[in-house]
Amino acid sequence: MLLPSRVNWGVSFNLDATLIYLGAQLQSFRDGEVALVIQESAPRLLDVSSQAEAARQILSQPLNLTLPNFREGDPGPWTYDVSVLVNMLGVTIDDSSGTAQMKVGLDRVALRNTLTELKTFVDRQPDNARFVFNDGTSQIEPIAVSTIGRSMDVEASIAAINEALLRGEHTVALSVSEEQPAVADTATGAELGVVQLVGEQTTYFYGSSDARIQNIVAAAERYHGLLVAPGETFSMGSVLGDVSLENGFAEALIIYGGRTIKGVGGGVCQVSTTLFRTVFFAGYPVAERYSHAYRVSYYEMDASGSVDTNFAGMDATVYFPLVDFKFVNDSTSWLLMETYVNVGARSITWKLYSTSDGRSVTWETTGPSNVVPPPEPLFEENSELRKNEIKQIDYAAQGADVNVTRTVWINGQVYFTDQFQTHYQPWQAICQYGPDTEDPEKKARKNNQCLSPSN
């Protein structure tokens, strides 16, 4: 960008004044000439040489943007070459003081767009340290350090960049405010009120595929060592984050759109169900809970692998952000969560540590009622299968209603009572067969697949 070294006076044609002279000449009924009325105006700026030098200074070298208080693992620095700065250079005229002044700098709109993109990398929430409870010493031990939160002020950063460039500085710290985490890794259990085990539950997943087990492990890891503040409503989905292949999850069976299909994250609900049970029996209020569309045997298994109908209606599903599981730490102490997956035993255990306030739980269940048999199996052709090949892609389940009532006591007095009502849909078995398959229903029965409820 080049700034002119000399200035020119402006000229403008005054139409109204010229028409007045022209009208007077016409009214005289004589030949004559009418001169156009031209007005000259002085330029608002007479000397721009200083700003030309400022522009050359801005473009003299690349711009480097950094984070203040840079720590290992932080993003940045970001470097913008001169060729990029040329396209961002802008000129403004400020006459607020009565004297017009030209200011050269990086265009605020272009700079704002650039910094808004950077803000997604810079900003982060503060994270508390993570701990485990040493049952031998009754002390907490850090397993992950705390992190300081950051928030970039885009407008303040724009001003800081332009001011620094005009001073000849090309390495500029962004304007960032920091927020300290509530719990540092130096915290003690006594300070947090994390001094004893207050809840523990285990669920089982015998017969799970390798992919489903991988998802259980990946999801459980996200909660190990996590702290829940006094009074906090804990959202399981917000911690779970993006369930994707890139984040360590695999494709396994999920319930979606009225079908059991393959999808990323199948098995995560084993983890949410375990948390629900732990919170339920520890006596904490449940703020949000959804059951599965149909009864899934994994969520009703006991330690022997048998189905215990007392666990019907004791499942919880998470499909964030649409479906979440939330509970409230209504105590005055912090709550520490630990998760342990024993792949060999096909079990997951969730532990809660805090300070007991004397609460206990009694509960009763109706068990499955209003039982409805599943529909007759559905057989459908699949062109991707071979002739006479049968593949079962969904499994029958009875529909039912379950009502679970919980009473939470504190030192012999009723603290609160709540109910968990669950409606399970009757679920249809579905088998697919290859083209030209003869009597697929007979072949399925022979393979013990998609049997009729009446069989």
Image: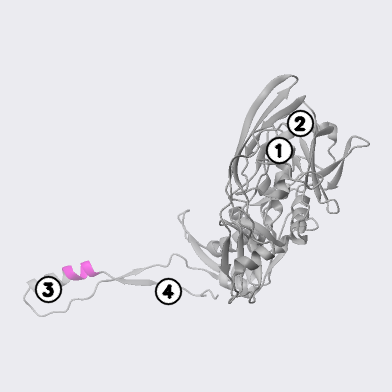
* Residue linked to disc 4: 8
> Which mark, residue 333?
2
* Residue linked to disc 1: 310
Residue 229 in sight here: no
Residue type indicated by callout 4? Asn
Give the mark nearer the N terminus: 2 vs 1: 1
How dense is the environment of label 3, judged by Cα within 10 Å: few (below 14), some, or many (20 and up)?
A: some
Q: Nearer the viewer, mark 2 or mark 4?
A: 2
> Which mark, residue 25?
3
Residue 6 drawn at (x, y percent)? 49, 75
Up-down relation of residue 50 to residue 424 (above or below): below
Magenta range: 15-20
* Quadrant of image for the C terminus: bottom right
Give the mark nearer the N terminus: 4 vs 1: 4
Q: Name the residue at 80% across, 29% down.
A: 355
Q: Are marks 2 and 1 in contact (CB under 8 Å)?
A: no
Residue 413 drawn at (x, y percent)? 71, 19
